[in-house]
Image: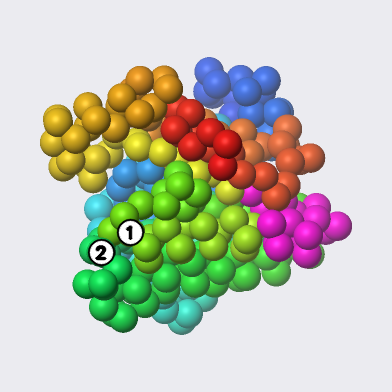
Amino acid sequence: MIGLDSVTFVTASSTNLGDEIYGGSASRVALVTGGGKGIGRGIAERLVSAGHRVAATYRSGEVPPGVLGVRCDVTDPEQVEAAFREVEAELGPVDILVANAGITRDTLMMRMSDADWDAVIATNLTGAFRVARRAARPMIKKRFGRILFISSVVGLLGSAGQVNYAASKSGLVGLARSLARELGSRGVTANVVAPGFIETDMTAELGEELTTKYEAQIPLGRLGQVDDVASAIAFLASDGAGYITGALIPVDGGLGMGH
């Protein structure tokens, strides 16, 4: 964990990203769950570059420079509450929430234990619900908020050996669209970004043969980059995306078209 005195924030005026890209967004407080590595870390970095004051929860890895790190397991309600209190004390109420924390416990359904199912649902779906519920309270009072869920193309297409993961990621769509209807009149949007195969440490373990096979199925002919996902999040978090809610934005190179 790092304190506010050791965080150097980047203002929007000091970036080269431009108001046009981010809809002229004001500097706001953003919280990214699972921001210690992979996609979550990249999102945190991008939101800092957009001029926001950013905090990130993590269980492993470390948050990027300029980000307030808060240790938190989203499956534990007390840790979630403590994390929000820390962010609020250091940075202020959360304006932008990116519910990214997730795990996998892959195996075929006939071999999947109750523990495998429960762990994935608890982190990926229930954890997302829990942080969204906590973030929504001050957003409603402020009449502004951006709630963003990181789903997956697997949640739309399905994947053998990932029934728990696919179910959890599909559930985020229903969660977001219900919240969009509940919170829209208070100026709070809820949207979903569904990445496809993104180059991370996890995909690096697939091996060249399997990676080549996946690339052949993707219309753009390549794996995505973390910044592809972070760019979509940065836009949806911006003031310019204020009339977008209940949307599912695929960032998958066309892999999931039609779903």
* Left or right of 180, for residue 162: left
Badge 1 crowding class, 10 Å Cα cut-off, few under 14, some 14 to 19, many 20 or more, is many
- Reading the image, the residue beneath label 2 is 108
The residue lying at 53 percent from left, 18 percent from top is 16
Q: Main secondary structure of the magenta part?
A: helix
Q: 259 or 10, which lies in front?
A: 259
Quadrant location of residue 252?
top left
Q: 49 or 99, which lies in front?
A: 99
Q: Secondary structure at mark 1?
A: loop
Position of residue 194 relative to residue 227, above or below, is below
The residue lying at 80 percent from left, 56 percent from top is 184
Badge 2 crowding class, 10 Å Cα cut-off, few under 14, some 14 to 19, many 20 or more, is few
Give the residues in magenta. 177-191
Q: Amino acid at mark 1?
A: Gln
- Reading the image, the residue beneath label 1 is 162
| Residue 225 position in % (x across, y down) | 36, 29
- Name the image colouring: rainbow
Q: Given this view, does label 2 or label 1 mark the residue nearer the observer?
A: 2
Q: Amino acid at mark 2?
A: Leu
| Residue 161 position in % (x across, y down) | 28, 59
The residue lying at 56 percent from left, 42 percent from top is 259
Dot 2 or dot 1: first in sequence order is 2
Q: Is residue 17 visible?
A: yes
| Residue 116 position in % (x across, y down) | 29, 73
| Residue 11 position in % (x across, y down) | 56, 32
Quadrant location of residue 34?
bottom left
Q: 40 or 66, which lies in front?
A: 40
Q: Secondary structure at mark 2?
A: loop
Residue that sits furthest to the front in the current view: 110
Q: Quick check: is 219 in the magenta stretch? A: no
